[in-house]
Amino acid sequence: MARATRWVLAAVMSFALPGWGGAAEFLDLLPAPAGAAAALDAAATWGFDWGEDVPDAAQLVNMARRFAALAPERVRVVEYARSLEGRPLVLVLVSGAENVARLDALKGDLGRLAEPQLLSSGEAERLMGTLPAVVWIAGTVHGDEASGADAGLALAAYLASADTPEAERIRAKSLVIVDPLQNPDGRDRFVAALRQSRGRAPDAEPASAEHQQPWPGGRFSHDLFDLNRDWFVLSHPETRGRVAAMLEWHPTVVVDLHEMDAEEAYYFPPPAPPLHPYLSSSHPPLWDVLGRSVAAAFDRVGWRYWTREVFDSFYPGYGETWPSLNGAVGMTFEQASPRGQVTRLEDGSRLTHRDAVRHHLLAAFTTCLTVADQPSRFLRAWHDYRQEAVRSGGRRAVALSCADDPGRAAELAALLVQQGVEVWRRSGEGGSEEYLVPLGQPAGFLARTLLDRRTPMGEAFESEQVRRDARRLPDQIYDITAWSLPLLWGVALREIDPWIPTQAFTKVSSGELRHGTVSGEGRVAFVVPWTGIGSARVLAALLADGVRVGVAGKPFRIAGRAFQRGALVIRSADQPEGLRARLEALASRCGVDVLGADSGYAEEGIDLGSTSVRWVRPPRVAILWDSPTSPTSAGQLRHALETTIGYPVTVVRTATLAVARLENFDVIVMPDSRGNNGYARVLGEGGAAALANWVRQGGVLVGVGGAARYLAEEKVDLLASNALMRTKKSGGGAEEGERKPSGEAPFDLNAHVVPEE
């Protein structure tokens, strides 16, 4: 290790010099045979050298494929997904020739080791002693955090080319998988803004246009989602593809390369508290080993860094925590960002994109070298974590069900299966279904994380947050604190102990959802119960096809089946041809059971011909877009309607609202806003007046978050409300309006956490 560290430090010391650049200098610093020059020559592919400019998504993929073609015995490039805008996402697999020649066999052996309950102890020991450790280096999940992608590719290029002892040891003892660009749509939005705004030379002034991105910025995906919050939600093809690839290759160490504020130097683990309670006692010492290796390298070069202060490992939707809950050592590396080619810092020095690439390159390479020096230790920690999940879960299982809407339980079950969680299904009478999640499985800790009602942060940490809150101090949580999927899906849980699988249960396959049916002839009408998202999808599709749909304003019972108000009534007469076939396809796809009624006469409640059944006129919906809206708020609202439900919307730029023809819309949705005076500043008096006039004429206006506050302002006065100031607590009782604990003990899986060693 000492020899490797000396070599890395000597090489990176040169990286820090202003004159670094060009393939020739790169090869001089990282000794490699002359034949490797082509693989490392960025200028031949990009027209500029490593770190001199910011390549776009296509340039990054072309570079990966180029050096894969030049070193096929050491490199494979695999496309694992396409972004929403159709850009490829690729993995670059780099290892020794012997490993690359048997990648399928390695994948099979890693898959066997990932199922410790099926292996004998002797076979597990053999595999841990012979398999390479899988080190996964990911970059640029946020599109404007550019250096991670470049550093990941530079690392792959070097490992593919260099014949130094250090590179050979990494190739022999590990399989390095580089996922250079996790968010190509955001990356290209950022690069386009950068190229369009800069002058003849890069401007280091932080206030310059090239450092101030126009709305919505490059951080987000096409749908304006933060993909580093999407790991278990799987709302995007980029995330779904990445999760599937991780389940295929079972990484033992995962590094996610990010950027942060330009003044912040460099961050690497150990992370800040709180730590997720299902992380094992082996995670902190391994973070320490890897962190100390990176620290030693940075110390010798003289680069600033810090640890443990801000970034926690608690929320399971991060690129650090989700892999850790599968047994890997997940880590976030954060590099100060120039947000372009160069920016001036407060002390007068300059931070360049080249600097950022070097820092990430050193940290990633040092991580690979540290793992390669003790691969069995990291493999064992990963295997033991999954084995402990099996042991601690025992024969317990969690049952998921939803009597009102079986499709919701089915969707949640399918989401768990997509993440490698084993799920079983049992069908009951009347089409009811129950899903069983065994807790004694290799992915048991991840399953418990996603299903539990509450995840504790530790008594000391929680007490400190209560103290800070009482003093009006900011909390110490980096981001999200709650995510219980059963609560989000509206699905009931019950624990079964012990659970013994019988012939009544069948294993759920990946992507398998509940399929609804159409019963009855439907000579008079078809009735769709209103159960939630599935019914909304049916309604949206029918309206798009020009089908006339009614909504029942009161409950009724017909053909022996009860329907609540909100049920959809589709009369069979005067409809487009093929109505039944269309309903059968929708019922199957949306998981909704449709009744075909041969008479409109109800056994109870209103008849199908009642005036309480009102025809639906497809609403024309607009969503405000652009500044000052929060990109993630605007994005998720549009995604919910267009993608989740399948209903078309129009996005209207906020600055044009005052002159837009609002009479073309029935509903206008105002997303949450950035800043307290955002809407007032952008809409002005003209925009506010246009909205008020449109509402008086019958328009429906929906305000979210800051938009609701704007609508309640005295000058706007479109939302009657009173602002209540939050006050400090006095005494030990609850404040007026504060909910007291109910005393009900929630279903809590945290009674069985990973034991301390």
Image (tube, rainbow, N blue to C red):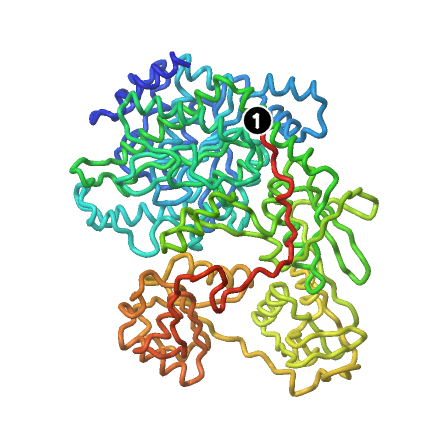
Residue extending farthest to the bottom is 611
Location of residue 319 with respect to 677 vertically, above or below: above
Q: Name the residue under label 1.
A: 381
Location of residue 661 with respect to 411 vertically, above or below: below
Residue extending farthest to the front is 731
Query: What number of labels is visible?
Result: 1
Judged left or right of residue 85, residue 125 is: right
Which of the pair 377/747 is nearer the observer? 747
Residue extending farthest to the right is 503
Location of residue 107 with respect to 236 vertically, above or below: above
Give coordinates of residue 45: x percent, y percent: 33, 32
Which of the pair 144/126 is nearer the observer? 126
Q: Element under label 1?
A: helix
- Could you tell me which quadrant the N terminus lies in? top left
Give coordinates of residue 47: x percent, y percent: 28, 33
- Could you tell me which quadrant the C terminus lies in? top right
Quadrant position of residue 129: top right
Given the image, on which type of amino acid does mark 1 rest? Ala
Task: Identify the residue at image location x=65%, y=74%.
Answer: 568
User: Pointer 1: residues within 10 angstroms few (<14), some, or many (20+)?
Assistant: many
Judged left or right of residue 62, residue 537 is: right
Give coordinates of residue 179: x percent, y percent: 46, 35
Task: Identify the residue at image location x=66%, y=63%.
Answer: 586
Judged left or right of residue 379, residue 52 is: left
Give coordinates of residue 490: x percent, y percent: 63, 60
Which of the pair 711/524 is nearer the observer? 711
Task: Identify the residue at image location x=74%, y=66%.
Answer: 518
Location of residue 439 with respect to 680 vertically, above or below: above
